Image: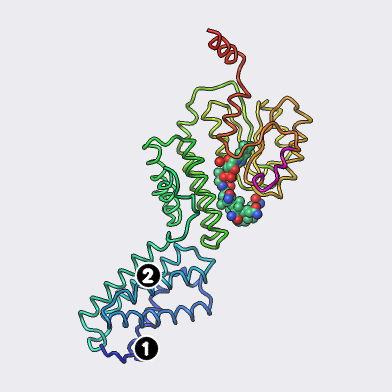
Amino acid sequence: MSLMMGLNDPRLLQLAQQIYADHFVRDPKLEKEYDERRKKLMYEDILYNISFLMTAVHFSDEKIFTSYARWLYDLLCNLMTDLDRDRIMVQMNDHYQILSDSLDKLPEDLLSKDEKESARLYLQKAIDLTQDAVMNIPLSVDFLENSHGEYRRAYLDALMHSNTREANAVIDRAREQGVPILEIYEGILSVVMHEVGRLWHENKLTIDKEHYCSSVTQTVMSRFYDEIFLQPRQPLTLICCAVGSELHEIGGRMLSDLFEYEGWNTVYLGAAVPEKALLNAILEHKPNLIALSVTMPQHLLECESLVSAVKKQFPEVKIAVGGRAFKMTSRVWEKWPVDYYADTAAELIEWSQHAFRTKEETTADIKSDQG
Ligand code: B12
């Protein structure tokens, strides 16, 4: 290989053009994702990639190429915020693969047989490290803490790679290894979803991926339904919903499932439930407890009016409120006629175990205290 071979060597320019064309054939989605400006930058990047690869081969130093590949991945993730990290990884790795497959087209005087071997090795290293880089993002300090850190990491990793099968397998593993359902819900799934929100906020995850994470998490939760609905019943009913125009429904669903697991009959009304619909449901199901979930603070107004309407029409029914929105206030619920506020479903369950004791349970306790 001649050291002075610059990118103005026509054979290299021809190779770059061929790779560019092949990439669009291999991955037709690129046409939709790339406008003219992006296409121009992509072509320039191909030239850079070849140039870095040639330099690394010349010095027999793979690091020249791999450190560049790592840098390029971060750069592209910051520039193409409409594409998620996983998709950018696929694009880059396709490119490296096409480049690797095309090396034989270069004549020996440009790249010898041995140099082609090294180049293929460096490209494979770049593919591997770009694959790993998808999850190479700083996570919240406490995300990996406690005994569930590994499950959280593995579950988030599977979601980031859109690997639904693996996401299910991670949670199955946690259950098989004895993690209680309550901890799977609140210690793994909920924490991961909050992290998903943070990554979205920091532009490290696209909206479609956020939707995907929500839907997989709901499917994962449904895998426990056989177990959840088989628990011994209690004569207690819960109605739960997300109020007003609130679309965040996973917290409420989690809470309902966990009450069902405790033996309650639960009626989960889902997202964005209008006041009249909730009042009708109370009339029909005569619940002991109503749990209202609010995630976005702007829906607190609707929640306040709902609480007043329910208390006015059904003064005997207990009301609990919770959800992310309340954590962003200076305890607004204290001014409302609610019976309980809790940060987590587990706390509300604990409270309800005392608040809804049957006469028989209380009498049995008194007797055992006396005897
Ligand atoms: C998934 C998600 C969505 C999904 C929801 C899908 C679904 N089917 O639910 C979709 C894509 C629809 C969505 C939309 C939006 N979202 Co969104 N979303 C999230 C995300 C990532 C996770 C929510 C979640 O499922 N958490 C897991 C559950 C289990 O946790 P939880 O709700 O907190 O519930 C727990 C406790 O709070 C408690 N709890 C909940 N309810 C109750 C009730 C009672 C009575 C009790 C006791 C306890 C309790 O128990 C639960 C279990 O521990 C959050 C991030 C976050 N930090 O929450 C952002 C987040 C809430 N979304 C946000 C935003 C901005 C939006 C959008 C405006 C834009 C967008 N991202 O697309 C829209 C608005 C939609 C609307 N009109 O409501 C912001 C809100 C910021 C803010 N200023 O308030 C967040 C915080 C992301 C972020 N970091 O910026 N979102």
Q: Which dot, 1 or 2, sits closer to the camera?
A: 1
- According to the picture, the residue beneath numbered tag 2 turns out to be 94
Q: Position of residue 245 (x, y in %)?
A: 69, 47
- Residue at 58% across / 27% down in the picture? 265
Q: Is mark 1 within 8 Å of ligand 1?
A: no
Give the quarter of the figure containing the N terminus: bottom left
Helix or strand or loop: what does disc 2 sit on?
A: helix
Q: Position of residue 345 (x, y in %)?
A: 57, 36
Residues in magenta, as a range: 326-334
Three-letter amino acid code at the position of disc 2:
Asp
> Could you give the CA–CA distance between mark 1 and mark 2, rounded to whole angstroms?
22 Å
Displayed quadrant of residue 369 = top right
Q: Residues within 10 Å of mark 2 (few under 14, many from 20)?
A: some
Q: Nearer the viewer, residue 66 or 283?
A: 66
340 relative position to 360: left or right: right
Displayed quadrant of residue 50 = bottom left
Q: Earlier in the sequence, mark 1 or mark 2?
A: 1
Three-letter amino acid code at the position of disc 1:
Leu
Q: Is residue 368 visible?
A: yes
- According to the picture, the residue beneath numbered tag 1 turns out to be 7
142 relative position to 52: left or right: right
214 relative position to 244: left or right: left
- Residue at 78% across / 29% down in the picture? 313
